[in-house]
Structure formats: structure tokens, C-alpha cells
Amino acid sequence: METETFQELLTEEGQALLAELRGFAPGDELAVATRLRREHPAELVSAAIGQERLRQRAQAKFGADAQSMYFTPNGVEQSTRRSVAEWRARRFAQLGVGRLADLCGGIGGDAIALARAGISVLAVDRDPLTCAVARANAAALGLAELIEVRCADVTQTEVDGFDAVFTDPARRTDRGRVFDPAAYSPPLSWAIEAGRSRPFGALKVAPGIPHEAVPADAEAEWVCDHGEVKEAVLWFGTRAPAEQPHRATLLPGGHTLTGGRLPDPPAGPVRRYLYEPDGAVIRAHLVAEVAEQVGGTLIDPKIAYLTSDRLVSTPFAHAYEIDEVLPYNVKKLKALVRERGAGTVVIKKRGMAITPEELRRLLKPSGPNTVTVILSRTDNGPLMMLGQPITD
């Protein structure tokens, strides 16, 4: 979509079209388009239908705001989930940030969260259409007075006078995801210096960033939302203690675990309770901190399953009560599932080549009960553990 066509969506005619299309079923698209093109320009109808389609997709990230916002396909794909953006905005607000430069601002998802936290934002992006969409979003949500959108090269943007800089480099090209931080746009090295240039800085990176790529003066935070690791952020100026360089944050609860300097716990036999650390905890290398909480040991030096005789409530790991531990054997497992009358088999696994779907087909579960099967590689050979999850 061209910028000029998008601007037409903001006119009275475009707004009427969008209102009429709200909530339309994708299966009705051809009939709806044919009818609307009798009264409106075909290009505008196509743009409005495309925008409603994007709004429906964006609801998973932006909730009710999506029905008032505007999007591009890349904007929906790459923008920060609302809950994650709000968490980061709260951190900036707690640091006392009043003015922030949002570099690579995209369609404005982060700028919206920052403005709602009371922060004045300069949102910079080099794509004219993306900037037009960001301006429209600020206006649609009543935040235009707090968000200035500038179409410019972020590497040429002057940030003097701002309390903080937030950078979200592009990690995709026409060929797909970019895994090499040096190939980010702008490169990771430039974004790091931008973060250091003001009293506070934050740099969004892929969750899989190697720990050796994290600068020594940065606090690295991995954020998980509803059980899914969404991003990692490098923070500058937060003065994280040297013994706590890493942070795992779990949303929506806002639970935070810090650390990163404890030695790995020893490995030992499986005991009554098995703990599965959250993905953000694993990414942040904070499994040892959870082991300390639950009095646990690993079941294998390279597998992030903890085991303990104690049941300890922690938001940073899912607990299971284990009642059977055996060497991995599909025939034996099938017999156990049948004995328990389990028609529902929840399969968790680490360090094993078989997929849960493949194993479930082999087990042919049947019956009214549910059982959890946890498979893991260990130094003593692959194990299968049967039990039930502990719910608070």
C-alpha cells in the first residue's frame, strides 16, 4: 500500500468504509468487495479490506486497541506485544524518564505504551508509510501531544536532551529472520552505543542472543508473556549489581528473577517433585537461582529439569509430582498408559529426538484419565517420568 492510499483511509469516506467492514468474516471478502466497489474506488476498498484484515490479526498483540489502530503487514509481524511494551514503559517511568527517543519506532506500539506511562516520545523510522501509520495511531488513541513521529535515518538522529534511548533494530530482511547481530539494521554495535549515549538506554534483541554478545555494562532481561519467551532487552544505566547481570521477567504477573552468577547445581537422581523452569529463566541462565529456591538438583548437567523432595511454590518453574521413573521404553510406557486408563497424555521432553506427536501416535491413548509423561536424556540413559502437574 502506498502512503497516498493509506491517507485516503483517514478521510471521511475511508473511515466510513472501515466502520462498515468491522468484524467481517474472511469468507465473505469477495462478496463484500464486489458490493463496495460499486460505490467506492476499487483501490480504496482493497486498502480498507486489507486494513480490517490486519486489525483482526493484531488483536492478539494489541487487544481492543487494534480496532482503532492502523497497521502494515510488517508492523503486525514485528511490533511489540502490548503487555511487553507496557512492562518496558513502566521500567522507564520508574527510572524517572520524561523524554525518550524511540529509534526504529515502527507503527508506534512501543511509543503508545511509553506515552501512556506519561513519557514524551520522539518516534523515528525511515519508512514514510510506517511513519504515516504511527502518526495515525497516536492520533487515534489520543496520544498525539505526547508522540512526535519523525521520518528519518535513526543513525543521523540527534538524541541530546533526551533522558533515554530505546532502539528496536530490524531483524528481518526480504530473505527472512536475521540471526547475526552485526546484520541488524542498524547494527547491534551502533545500537549499543546509542543506548550508552544517554543516562538510560534499552535495546531490543532476539531472545537467542549469545550471552557472550551481551556487553559487560548491560543488564540483560528476557521477557516471557503467557509462557512464551518474546524478547530480550539490553538495559544501560540501570546499575544492575555485578552479581545480578541477568533478569527473567514473567508476564502478566510481572514476576522478576535476577542473578546469573551462581554455579550450576549438581546432578542427581529424580526425586518426588520435578520442576520445569520457565523459558525466560532458562534463556537468562538463572536455573541455578530456581534450584536454590526449591532446594533442587539437576537430573542431568545439560538438561534444565530440576528435582527436589520439597514442594515449593515459585512462579519461575512448573512443578510436577512424579510417581514413576523408568528407563525410556515405548512398549512399557504404552502398557502404563493403558493401565492408568489415560486417554489424554501430556508429553514434555528435553534432549530426546522423538516428537510428542509421534510418541502419542505410538501410545494410542484411550480412557477418561490424564497423565503427564516427561522424557529426558540423562547421563544414565534416557528416562521416562510419569506424574501430574501441581496447580496452585
Image (spheres, helix red, strand yellow):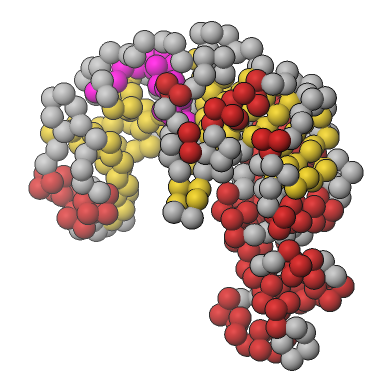
What residue is rendered at 54% in x and 23% in y?
A: 220
In reply to whether residue 54 is colored magenta, the answer given is no
Q: Nearer the viewer, residue 296 or 185?
A: 185
The answer to whether one can see residue 204 in this image is yes
The answer to whether one can see residue 227 in this image is no
Number of numbered discs overlaid on the protein picture: 0
Question: Which range of residues does the magenta coloring cover?
Answer: 278-300
Q: Is residue 368 above or below residue 267?
A: below
What residue is rendered at 25% in x and 17% in y?
A: 267
* Residue 174 in the image, given as x and y percentages of width and height: 49, 55
Q: Is residue 141 above or below residue 26?
A: above
User: Would residue 38 appear left or right of 336 to someone viewing this image?
Assistant: right
In reply to whether residue 291 is colored magenta, the answer given is yes
Q: Is residue 97 above or below residue 216?
A: below
User: Would residue 236 appear left or right of 98 to someone viewing this image?
Assistant: left
User: Would residue 77 appear left or right of 335 to someone viewing this image?
Assistant: right
Q: Nearer the viewer, residue 135 or 269?
A: 135
* Residue 254 in the image, given as x and y percentages of width and height: 62, 30
User: Would residue 114 appear left or right of 87 to someone viewing this image?
Assistant: right
* Residue 234 in the image, given as x and y percentages of width and height: 57, 26
What residue is rendered at 22% in x and 54% in y?
A: 358
